[in-house]
């Protein structure tokens, strides 16, 4: 598996949430028609989810917009952003994500100091 340590951590987290024995498949950094590469696409028959992993100081509206672009291009039903435990979520970003039906999931991962 390629990617940062955080992406590997998130892969293990989403595998636990979307188990293979329930029909879920995980694509790692698939290239979309536009050339964009979301971190993960999780799917099973009739249902697709695009997932991004963000290990950064603070989530920004552009992170939500990027995920929305990926979900639209992929024709996914939903999008999830996994973040490090200490990533800040400004109130305006949380409200924007909620309004756009983007799920933000905080992990137990801590950023390196």
Image: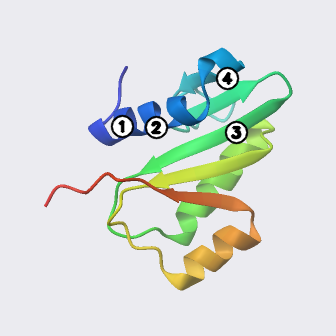
- Discs 3, 1 touching: Cβ within 8 Å: no
Mark number, residue 98? none
In this figure, which residue is indicated by the disc labeled 3?
49
Tag nearer the camera, 3 or 1? 1
Image check: 41 left or right of 72? left
Dot 1 falls on a residue whose secondary structure is helix
**Residue at 36% over, 37% down:** 9
Query: How far is disc 4 from disc 2 in space, using C-alphas?
Result: 13 Å
In this figure, which residue is indicated by the disc labeled 1?
9
Image check: 75 left or right of 82? right
N-term mark: 3 or 2: 2
N-term mark: 4 or 2: 2
Query: How far is disc 2 from disc 1 in space, using C-alphas?
Result: 6 Å
Residue 89 place in picture, x, y as percent: 47, 74
**Residue found farthest to the bottom:** 91
Snapshot quadrant of residue 73:
top right
Residue 112 place in picture, x, y as percent: 17, 55
**Residue at 75% over, 34% down:** 48
Residue 74 place in picture, x, y as percent: 75, 36
In this figure, which residue is indicated by the disc labeled 4?
24
In this figure, which residue is indicated by the disc labeled 2?
13
**Residue at 65% over, 68% down:** 97
Image check: 22 left or right of 16? right
Query: How far is disc 4 from disc 3 in space, using C-alphas?
Result: 10 Å
- Discs 2, 1 touching: Cβ within 8 Å: yes
């Amino acid at each position: 598996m390629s990617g940062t340590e955080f992406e590997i951590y998130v892969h293990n987290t989403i595998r636990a949430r979307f188990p293979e024995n329930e029909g879920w498949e995980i694509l790692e950094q698939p290239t979309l028609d536009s050339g964009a590469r979301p971190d993960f696409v999780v799917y099973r028959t009739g249902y697709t989810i695009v997932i991004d992993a963000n290990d950064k100081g603070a989530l920004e509206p552009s992170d939500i917009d990027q995920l929305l672009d990926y979900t639209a291009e992929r024709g996914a039903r939903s999008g999830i952003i996994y973040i490090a435990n200490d990533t800040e979520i400004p109130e305006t970003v949380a409200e924007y994500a909620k309004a756009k039906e983007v799920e933000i999931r905080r992990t137990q991962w801590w950023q390196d100091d």
